[in-house]
């Protein structure tokens, strides 16, 4: 479980996160939604420690990251997998080497064992026969899946996904969502996922946090979202007239 | 700034890879530049030294000493600042912009140690090697130019080559090349690692790293000469 307490972050005079608090439970996909520029990426980076906080605390299983020893922090890092918005694969390494990299760095397994594990996770994300390709030679959706494979190869306890389905077609995007959901349940991972894709909200949101102008505006489950009265949330989620209609129909049915 | 490597074997592999990239990537240009530097210096020195009092073999002496003292270490390192420096800066800049450096940090790897240390050590090993190769090629370029254009015979050239040889000149050239290797790799790594923004900034960082390394190389060149000669 990850607990976020009153975190604040600004760049110069621009306040990006203003007093955000929430709890992320394990075995669940915790979704952070919000429009472009609302601070989702900054929120994730603050949580994993890639960006410093102005104030507030982040606790992993009750332990404050800020007061951890350096060794403890390093250990925590090896339990974190992160999928970046732009995939962040290492350009100079092949798909196989990219996924193997964390194993090379942090385990003492034999080459055969490592290769077995790599193929296992590549198989898990439905990627076969691309082992020896370079990132420049595969599509955006494949890159996301390789990055996901790399993020889960060490069996992380925490998985951070920054817009895993941006730039993907609806079908591939669902495949990636399903994968993340299954992996989360299977290994009881605390997953935190940024998105502005409504399919993934309805598909995989166990818990949803809506960021609006740097503040947590709304929090709930995907069932709650349909009945929410929050105007900003409604405008964000049910942006098109078509979806507005669908929502009305759904509410009528419920009555 | 740097910390103990997480896994020695991975770092060693990265170091060997960097040595290969750096050495092989710049060997061609070093060979060409050195041969021509030697050849041109020979012909121009012969053109300036027309006094009948000066023996022909003195030209060979001049070529040898200028190659060891200045042509190979300084001129070649300035070229390497362009070739190697811009490559390091743009590679690291690209890794920064595309969040690859963040990805390393998230894994719990000290990205400075992993990305920069092998490059600096590889430059420290490979650039002096390239400079030694360049020294011999410069002299050889001079020899070819001298004999082909008939400035002097090969006996005269060889006579000049061994006359009054001061081995400290060779050592001095090596001291310079170690210094310049450090300047080139650390300056370009600094500018590349700290890129903020996008593709445009990567280009700016790599230009800046070349300019700054060239200026520092010239300052260091003067400083070392004033200090050690
Ligand atoms: N390193 C930085 N320096 C200055 N400002 C920044 C920095 N990173 C982000 N910002 C600002 O913080 C705000 C939130 O950015 P962020 O990247 O978190 O948005 P986002 O919600 O992830 O958007 P998107 O959905 O487009 O990815 C933006 O206004 C951005 O300009
Ligand atoms: Mg973002």
Image (cartoon, rainbow, N blue to C red):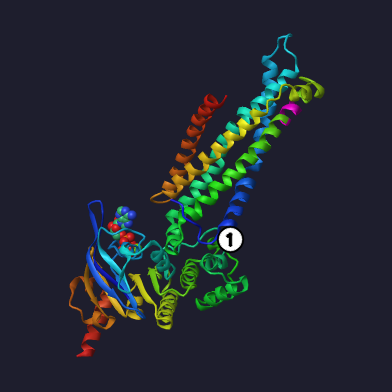
Rendered location of residue B9, percent (x, y): 58, 60
Please tell me which residue is depicted at 78% across the width and 22% down the height of the picture.
B159
Tell me: B10 left or right of B97. right
Q: Quadrant of residue B163?
A: top right
In the image, the segment drawn in magenta is B140-145
The C terminus of chain B: image quadrant? top right
Of the pair A141 and B41, the residue shown nearer to us: B41
Of residues A217 and B163, the one nearer the viewer is B163
Q: Position of residue B23 (x, y in %)?
A: 63, 46
The chain to which mark 1 is attached is B
Residue at the spot 81% in from the left edge and 24% down from the top edge: B154
Q: Residue at x 25, y 74 (%)?
A: A241
Q: Is residue B43 visible?
A: yes
Image quadrant in which you'd find residue B167:
top right
Q: Is residue A65 magenta?
A: no
Q: Is mark 1 within 8 Å of ligand 1?
A: no
The picture quadrant for ligand 1 comes to: bottom left
Magenta-drawn stretch, dominant element (helix, strand or loop): helix
Q: Is residue B56 left or right of residue A120?
A: right
Q: Is residue A86 above or below residue B193?
A: below
Q: Circle 1 is placed at which residue position? A: B9
- Can you tell which quarter of the image residue A32 is in? bottom left
* Residue A88 on image: x %, y %: 46, 62
């Amino acid at each position: 479980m990850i607990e976020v307490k009153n975190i604040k972050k600004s760049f110069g005079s621009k306040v990006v996160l203003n007093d955000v608090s929430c709890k992320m439970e394990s075995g669940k996909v915790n979704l952070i939604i919000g429009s472009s520029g609302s601070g989702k990426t900054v929120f994730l980076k603050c949580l994993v420690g890639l960006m410093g906080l102005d104030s507030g605390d982040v606790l992993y299983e009750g332990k404050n990251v800020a007061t951890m020893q350096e060794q403890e922090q390093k250990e925590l890092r090896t339990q974190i997998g992160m999928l970046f918005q732009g995939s962040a694969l290492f350009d100079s390494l092949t798909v196989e080497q990219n996924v193997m990299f964390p194993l090379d760095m942090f385990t003492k397994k034999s080459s055969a064992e490592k290769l077995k594990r790599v193929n296992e996770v590549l198989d898990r994300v439905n990627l076969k026969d691309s082992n020896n390709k370079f990132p420049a030679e595969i599509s955006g959706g494949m890159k996301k899946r390789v990055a996901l494979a790399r993020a889960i190869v060490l069996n992380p306890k925490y998985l951070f996904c920054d817009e895993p389905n941006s730039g993907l077609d609806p079908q591939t995007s669902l495949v990636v969502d399903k994968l993340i959901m299954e992996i989360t349940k299977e290994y009881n991972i605390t997953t935190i996922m940024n998105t502005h894709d409504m399919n993934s909200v309805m598909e995989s949101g166990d818990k949803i946090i809506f960021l609006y102008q740097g503040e947590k505006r709304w929090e709930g489950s995907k069932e709650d979202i349909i009945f929410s009265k929050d105007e900003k949330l409604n405008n964000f989620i049910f942006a098109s007239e078509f979806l507005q209609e669908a929502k009305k129909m759904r509410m009528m049915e419920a009555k | 700034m740097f910390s103990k490597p997480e896994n020695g074997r991975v770092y060693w592999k990265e170091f060997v890879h960097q040595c290969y990239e750096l050495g092989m990537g710049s060997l061609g240009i070093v060979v060409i530049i050195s041969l021509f530097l030697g050849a041109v210096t020979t012909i121009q020195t012969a053109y300036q030294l027309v006094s009948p009092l000066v023996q022909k073999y003195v030209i060979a002496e001049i070529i040898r000493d200028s190659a060891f003292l200045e042509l190979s270490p300084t001129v070649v390192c300035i070229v390497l600042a362009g070739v190697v420096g811009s490559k390091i800066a743009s590679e690291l800049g690209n890794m920064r912009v595309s969040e690859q450096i963040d990805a390393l940090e998230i894994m719990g790897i000290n990205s400075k140690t992993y990305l920069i240390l092998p490059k600096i050590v590889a430059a420290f090993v490979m650039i002096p090697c390239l400079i030694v190769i360049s020294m011999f090629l410069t002299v050889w370029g001079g020899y070819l130019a001298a004999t082909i254009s008939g400035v002097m015979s090969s006996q005269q050239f060889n006579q000049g080559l061994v006359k009054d040889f001061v081995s400290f000149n060779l050592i001095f050239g090596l001291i310079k090349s170690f210094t310049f290797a450090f300047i080139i790799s650390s300056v370009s790594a600094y500018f590349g690692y700290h890129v903020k923004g996008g593709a445009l900034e990567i280009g700016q960082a790599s230009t800046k790293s070349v300019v700054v390394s060239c200026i520092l190389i010239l300052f260091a060149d003067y400083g070392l000469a004033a200090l050690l000669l």
